[in-house]
Image: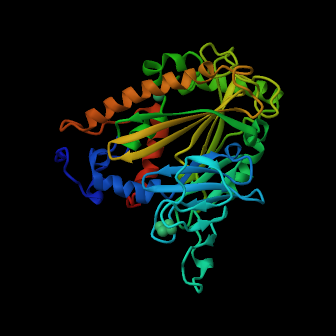
Amino acid sequence: MTPRLQPGSDPNLSDLLGRHRCGHALEQGFYTSDEIFAEDMERVFLPDWHYAGHVSELPNPGDYLLFEVLDESVILTRDAAGDIHALANVCRHRGSRVCLEQSGHTRRFTCPYHAWTYNLDGSLFSARLMSTDLDKTKLGLKTVPVEVFHGMIFVSFSDNPATFAGARAELDPLLKPFGLDRLRVAHRESYPVQANWKLLIENYNECYHCAPAHPEYARHHAMHMEFERFQPLNEALKPRAEALGIPTAMIDRVGVNCPAGSVDYTVSRQALFEGTDTGSDNGRPVAPLLGDLKGYDQGACDLYVGIFNPMLIYNDHAVIYRFIPVDTRTSVQEIIWLVHEDAVEGRDYDLNRLTWLWDVTTKADKFIIEKNQQGVNSRYYEPGPLAGMETFTQRFLDLYLDRMGRPA
Ligand code: FES
Ligand SMILES: [Fe+2]
């Protein structure tokens, strides 16, 4: 029998990796140890790509937006030429935060401490009362890797981030009909969850729990059914989608399928139940059609770019999920709802109807994930076997363990 870890003890990473049993949940220390959490952030979370905002939030030169996670703060700006920049919000003098507003419009950023001033591309404009031989070209705000992908702005904290070339080549034609660069953020909501960040992602990646936990979701989505019952619905979806010019090809480049040096990405078109147009209270549309779509095929796209940014694309709106670690046993689940850029609240959509399904579903997830963490904290916790319907959770765990240094 494996020795039990007492709550609060700090197990060593290689011990935990060595004790992990394939096809099982993770050892307790992965969810309870502050040292493991610190390793998680360095090895897995920070180096990956993170959805930081949408270009529609920075429509004009001079617009800016803060993206903040853990100890990091990034200023997203649009410069006079229209280009997007991601700048570390850390003054090159003595390190103060430079930009304090969550969003706004400016010509330059002035540090609140000693008033060094930076341009929209991060270059140092002026440093008052400093000697004239100060080399200003070496003291611009540091830049953070940034990619704009179909209007979505992604940021990474790696010095050598994974590339988007493969994702662009393979996903561009599949995503084009949805006009994702012509969306607008209708609403974003943060749900604090008292649980380790991995429990949020494990939960999102399986629909084994959907039938018992999410009656509202299960009414209209078929993903919670066994493969044999789900697959015929996906086959029936294909002609409906193709008639509307919606691609149904499945691309899967995650984990072992991901080419070396590339960001992980995957897209698939999944059937909703027949008669269900979108994810809503009654399955009826909640907003105007996206992009160039001409109707409802009664399907939805599951899209991942990076392992932290799943997105669900219905025909009339899109939903982005962010899993944000705060500390070992605290996370935030953020949900961002996007609609066609021309859609006007009150006229074209009702915000309560638009957000209802994923609000109620996320609150139910918060409850079950917190109960999961509480059980995992116990001296009686022992990792159990995963179900066939937890394949994607298994895949996330494998990817996680590999990035944590599991021996091949
Ligand atoms: S710390 Fe920013 S000007 Fe001194
Ligand atoms: Fe769920």
- Seen as rendered, the residue at the extreme bottom is 133
Q: Quadrant of residue 220?
A: top right
Q: Quadrant of residue 238?
A: top right
315 or 341, nearer to the observer: 341
73 or 310, nearer to the observer: 73
- Report the residue at 60% width, 66% height from top: 117
Q: Is residue 257 left or right of residue 190?
A: right
x%, y% of residue 406? 38, 58
x%, y% of residue 102? 55, 47
294 or 75, nearer to the observer: 75
- Report the residue at 49% width, 72% height from top: 93
Judge whether residue 139 can be spotted in this image: yes
Residue 293 vs 383, above or below: the answer is above
For the image shown, how many numbered marks are present on the structure? 0
Judge whether residue 24 can be spotted in this image: no
- Report the residue at 59% width, 22% height from top: 221
Residue 179 vs 354, above or below: the answer is below
Q: How is the image coloured?
A: rainbow
Q: Quadrant of the C terminus?
A: bottom left
Q: Quadrant of the N terminus?
A: top left
x%, y% of residue 355? 58, 24
Residue 178 vs 5, above or below: the answer is above
x%, y% of residue 395? 48, 44
Q: Is residue 359 left or right of residue 286?
A: left
Q: Is residue 214 left or right of residue 336?
A: left
- Report the residue at 52% width, 17% height from top: 216
